Structures are given as structure tokens and as C-alpha cells.
Amino acid sequence: MYIIIGLGNPTREYQATRHNIGFDVITRISDDFNIPLDIKKHKAICGKGMIEGEKVVLAQPQTYMNLSGESVRELLDFYKVTPSEIIVIYDDISLEVGQLRLRSKGSAGGHNGIKSIINHLGSDEFLRIKVGVGDKPKGWDLADYVLSRFNDEEQPIIRDAIKKSSEAVKSIIKDGMEPAMNLYNRK
């Protein structure tokens, strides 16, 4: 079993922002694999289904980004999985818009949602899909940038990255993390 968690902030004002790319990927996975997001539990909106013959739970934590670990901890405790059986999908400003980077562990890299998850799990050894949202422009406040929306030029790139992220989840489940990293960790 895998728990696939997309990070973001609840409420309409944050929809389609750079920081909510994890939510957008979960919505795409929900559509691609016909897994309805119809359960409100564990401080998250969840859906249960199958991908490649494997049971999965999709989750969009509703705690706001900086408290994501609360929801993730509840999910792990309830479903009795280990950190290595979760896939966390989130935005990364150190990657170009649309670039993916898969990792099986690592630091928070300044990302408050990941920091919260590491604190609540006591481990940084969980699978991740980082989706590049681009570096903040000079003179911008970081919070303002990650809460901004993609411009017209970036829209097709980010739609493709969301599609590829859904495919990467399938690849991780079907073939394992190493082959998926070899496939998706390129510019």
C-alpha cells in the first residue's frame, strides 16, 4: 500500500498557485486512475483506489502547508504504513518550471511543509516528487511568489509536469523508485 500526499493550502484563494502544485497533481492522479476524492478524514481530503494492482490512498492535507505533518502522521498511524510507503508531491523553487526531481529521502530544503512532515515522522526517509515552480524573481518576497499563479507562458509547461508527475507515481508503484528516478530526473 502507498499513501500519495500532495501538499498545498486549502480554500479557493490558494487554488492553482505554485505552492499548491501537490494538490493539482493529486487531482490529476484522481482523474487518471478513477479514484474519487470523497473522504474527509485524517485532516485531509482523501480517496482510496488502486494503481497498478496496488492499494493507494490519495491525500490533500487540509491543515495548511506549515502543519502538513499533522495530517501525514495521522495517515501513517491509521493505515499502519512506514515512511518509505508514502510519496509526497510538492513545489520546489530551486527547479525550473515543470522540471521533476524524484528522491527517496533528504532534507526539507527550506520547504515548511516538508519540515513539518520530517518533524512529525522523525524521519526524512520518504519518497518525494518535487515539481519545479521556478526561482522567485529578484525583489519578490518568497511567500508572495509561491502564492502566485503561473503565467500564460508557464501554463502548458506546468500542465505537462502535472501529467508527468501522475505518470511518475505509476512508475514508482510499478517498477520502484530507482527506475522511476532514472526516467524522470532529467531536464
Image (cartoon, rainbow, N blue to C red):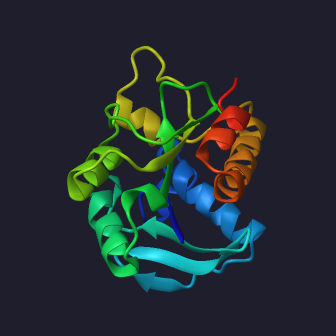
Q: Quadrant of the N terminus?
A: bottom right
Q: Is residue 8 visible?
A: no
* Displayed quadrant of residue 169: bottom right
Residue 167 lies left or right of residue 79; in this view the side is: right
Residue at position x 35%, y 31% from top?
A: 109
- Residue 79, percent from left and from top: 40, 78
Residue at position x 40%, y 70% from top?
A: 81
The vertical placement of 37 against 115, above or below, is below
- Residue 7, percent from left and from top: 45, 55
Residue at position x 38%, y 63% from top?
A: 82
The vertical placement of 168 against 13, above or below, is above
Choose between 29 and 124: the one closer to the eye.
124
Residue 161 lies left or right of residue 61; in this view the side is: right
Residue 10 lies left or right of residue 114; in this view the side is: right
* Count of numbered labels shown in the rendering: 0
* Displayed quadrant of residue 61: bottom left
Q: Is residue 127 visible?
A: yes
The furthest residue to the top: 138
